[in-house]
Image: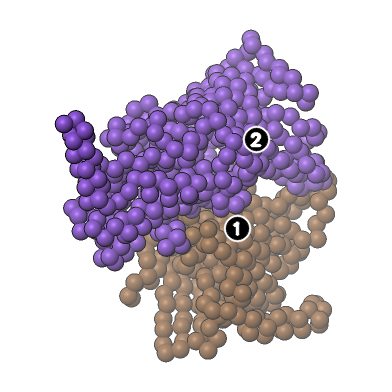
Chain colours: A purple, B brown
């Protein structure tokens, strides 16, 4: 009797699987073949839930496009599924193992795309992206995820240019720096990284031509509650700071339209000298903080950020910045007003390097994904802060729903 | 007196421009660096998500010194404007520019320093039917918001442009005003200005331009080549040659 009972359960399961028509293993296999990590696919009668993390495609939008095409192809290869009642499909996108943003759609949307009832543009409009993750997280089991992104080290190499304009005898003083960085995500959001600074070529900017470590830290990126993300770091940072830095984002509307920002640091003078010996002054800790908000005009991917705080050179500053996002490129204008004066300027961040990195492995060299350069129209030291290294909050804009919506079509067209 | 060789070259260059063409000119830069006619602005902006990098030659006798001895006065040297222009929003262009005086040694005692400035153009009305496009703009406006003390090229203006088509002929007419005001003094462009750009379908990628500003009548021609480069040459104030050259791409 027991054997028959089990046999009946198995038989019903197979029938249901055949009736549903799409295979969990097939989707997983396709996603893994795209070099995605932390992949999990869960299919039941009520819905399909998928999780993944991308560290292969430079652009997160391209990675999502690949996943959507995988799902589309799987549905397309199961004609019975096309005529079924619409099934919710949810995709959870992770970064550094932290759940970040969700894509909500349904099988009807894919079916209509396959049968040409809707265009790619309409398909994308029917996608719903937001920071409502709880309902999907409950349906997924982190322990079942395949191709883990943890304990894998990247050697990331980037470059920066330090410059000063305006001296009468030498109008442009330059220094080129190569900045290799070793970075490992140990577990969900826990990262260890060390960045070296190696001046190369002629330097008429300053007298420092020796290599040294400029950032060395442990950090934790996390999602606390729905729409609330944080970052905490401990270690050595730029501007010879040693201590702790913390920043927080809260999306009250669970979309990228509006965001509250806060942060505080407690640091002292500390650095790695040119012989790679750490030097720390433990009796001279200084705190900074800021509080503010960012509004995104989603129609144009245009951010307006306003914050007030206490900054590095003992000044209290109001900082206003506007930034336009063009897919992976950013152009911003900023104004900071404090007791030290007014600093205004603009900055540009462009994507560099290859569109696809090497396949993630235990050790992987790759290029930094961006090049950043600021220009100070009025170079007063107002509202300055140090750089603590790449983190989830700094990378957040790549995962913004409005950015996905605006840029997805060109990648879907390319892949199809 | 300009050397004969220079005039000969400019004439040849003018003819060559008419033929070194590829399809469809975009809205190109004026001498100022923003999208415009020859010197005067018009109510046109860059295409969406486009940016340009370029330079404009300001002939001697019209370039105003911006630092050191006799700053604010016509220096007698030519000048070069280096600009970057960006379509930040579909209705807003922003520009950053350096203006350098030619033939000036950069040595300590001259205290020479190139001038830098921001400018913007904001479209308040889109062209539709009989309605012209209307733009408000400002150049070198940072002194108005107490951020700098020097503003040699300041101007605030309102300009309207309207396209008129008749068979193969296309005329883009612009009329504007840069009033004197205490917030952004009208220095580089002042009072009423106007101009037109004429295109003919026979010369798809070229156009002829005339504009009038601050008692200067300017004429010139414009062409786009290799789908990326815009070039304008002209006669400023009907006396001195000038040119603008820019590279345009999409972000």
* Cα separation between marks 2 and 1: 32 Å
Asked if both marks, 2 and 1, belong to the same chain, the answer given is no
Assign a secondary structure to mark 2. Answer: strand
Residue at image point 60% right, 52% down: A354
- Is residue B218 found left or right of A110 in the rendered image? right
- Is residue A323 found left or right of A121 in the rendered image? right
Assign a secondary structure to mark 1. Answer: strand
Residue A116 in the image: above or below residue A212? below
Q: Quadrant of residue B38?
A: bottom right
Q: Where residue B84 is drawn, which disc sits there?
A: 1
Report the residue marked by disc 2. A181
- The x and y percentages for residue A319 are 50, 35
Residue at image point 68% right, 83% down: B16
- Is residue B59 found left or right of B154 in the rendered image? right
Residue A300 in the image: above or below residue A40? below
Residue at image point 81% right, 81% down: B5
- The x and y percentages for residue A327 are 48, 52
- The x and y percentages for residue B245 are 65, 69
- The x and y percentages for residue A290 are 47, 27
Residue A194 seen from this side: yes
How many other residues sit within 10 Å of disc 1, few (<14), some (14-19) or many (≥20)? many
Residue A45 seen from this side: no
Q: How many numbered circles does the render carry? A: 2
Residue at image point 56% right, 21% down: A234
Q: Chain of mark 2?
A: A
Extreme residue toward the left, this view = A1
Q: Chain of mark 1?
A: B
Q: Of B156 and A285, which appears nearest the observer? A: A285
Q: Where residue A108 is drawn, which disc sits there?
A: none
Q: Of A39 and A208, which appears nearest the observer? A: A39
Extreme residue toward the top, this view = A283
């Amino acid at each position: 009797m027991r054997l028959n009972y089990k046999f009946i359960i198995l038989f019903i399961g197979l029938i249901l699987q055949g009736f549903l028509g799409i295979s969990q293993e097939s989707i997983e296999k396709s996603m893994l073949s795209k070099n995605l990590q932390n992949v999990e696919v869960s299919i039941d009668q009520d819905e399909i839930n998928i999780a993944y993390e991308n560290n292969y495609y430079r652009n997160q939008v391209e990675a999502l496009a690949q996943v959507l095409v995988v799902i589309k192809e799987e549905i397309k290869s199961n004609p019975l599924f096309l005529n079924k009642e619409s099934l919710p499909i949810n995709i959870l996108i992770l970064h550094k193992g932290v759940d970040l943003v969700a894509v909500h759609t349904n099988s009807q949307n894919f079916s209509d795309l396959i049968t040409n009832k809707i265009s790619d543009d309409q398909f994308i409009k029917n996608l719903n992206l937001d920071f409502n993750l709880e309902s999907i997280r409950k349906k997924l089991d982190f322990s079942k995820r395949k191709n883990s992104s943890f304990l894998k080290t990247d050697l990331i190499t980037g470059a920066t240019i330090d410059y000063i304009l305006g001296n009468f005898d030498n109008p442009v003083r330059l220094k080129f720096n190569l900045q290799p960085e070793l970075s490992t995500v140990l577990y969900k959001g826990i990262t260890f990284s060390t960045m070296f600074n190696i001046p190369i070529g002629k330097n008429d900017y300053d007298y420092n031509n020796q290599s040294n470590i400029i950032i060395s830290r442990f950090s934790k990126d996390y999602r606390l509650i729905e729409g609330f993300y944080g970052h905490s770091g401990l270690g050595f940072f730029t501007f010879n700071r040693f201590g702790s830095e913390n920043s927080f984002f809260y999306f009250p509307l669970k979309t990228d339209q509006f965001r509250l920002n806060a942060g505080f640091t407690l640091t002292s003078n500390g650095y790695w000298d040119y012989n790679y010996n750490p030097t720390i002054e433990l009796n001279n800790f200084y705190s900074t903080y800021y509080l503010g908000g960012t509004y995104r005009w989603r129609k144009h991917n245009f951010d307006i950020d306003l914050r007030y705080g206490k900054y590095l050179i003992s000044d209290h500053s109001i900082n206003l910045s506007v930034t336009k996002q063009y897919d992976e490129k950013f152009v911003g204008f900023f104004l900071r007003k404090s007791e030290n004066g007014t600093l205004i300027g603009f900055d540009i961040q462009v994507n560099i390097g290859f569109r696809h990195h090497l396949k993630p492995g235990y050790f992987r060299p790759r290029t930094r994904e961006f090049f950043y350069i600021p220009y100070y129209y009025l170079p007063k030291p107002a509202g300055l802060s140090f750089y603590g290294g790449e983190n989830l909050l700094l990378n957040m804009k790549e995962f913004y729903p409005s950015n996905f919506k605006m840029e997805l079509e060109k990648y879907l067209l390319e892949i199809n | 007196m300009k050397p004969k060789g220079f005039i000969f070259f400019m004439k040849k260059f003018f003819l060559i421009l008419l033929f070194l063409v590829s399809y469809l000119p975009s809205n190109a830069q004026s001498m100022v660096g923003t999208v415009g006619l020859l010197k005067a602005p018009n109510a046109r902006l860059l295409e969406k998500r486009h940016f340009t990098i370029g330079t404009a030659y300001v002939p001697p006798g019209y370039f105003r010194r911006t630092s050191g001895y006799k700053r604010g006065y016509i220096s007698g040297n030519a000048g070069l404007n280096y600009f970057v222009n960006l379509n930040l929003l579909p209705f807003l262009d922003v520009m950053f520019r350096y203006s350098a005086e030619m033939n000036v040694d950069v040595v300590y005692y001259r205290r020479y320093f190139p001038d830098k400035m921001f400018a913007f153009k904001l479209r308040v009305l889109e062209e539709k039917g009989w309605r012209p496009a209307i733009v408000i703009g400002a150049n070198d406006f940072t002194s108005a918001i107490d951020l700098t003390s020097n503003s040699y090229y300041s101007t605030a203006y309102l300009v309207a442009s309207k396209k008129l088509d008749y068979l193969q002929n296309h005329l883009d007419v612009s009329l504007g005003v840069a009033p004197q005001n205490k917030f952004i003094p009208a220095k580089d462009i002042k009072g009423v200005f106007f101009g037109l750009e004429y295109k003919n379908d026979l010369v798809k990628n070229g156009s002829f331009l005339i504009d009038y500003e601050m008692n200067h009548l300017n004429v010139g021609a414009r062409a786009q080549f290799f789908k990326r480069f815009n070039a304008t040459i002209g006669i400023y104030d009907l006396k001195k040659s000038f040119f603008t050259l820019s590279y345009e791409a999409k972000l």
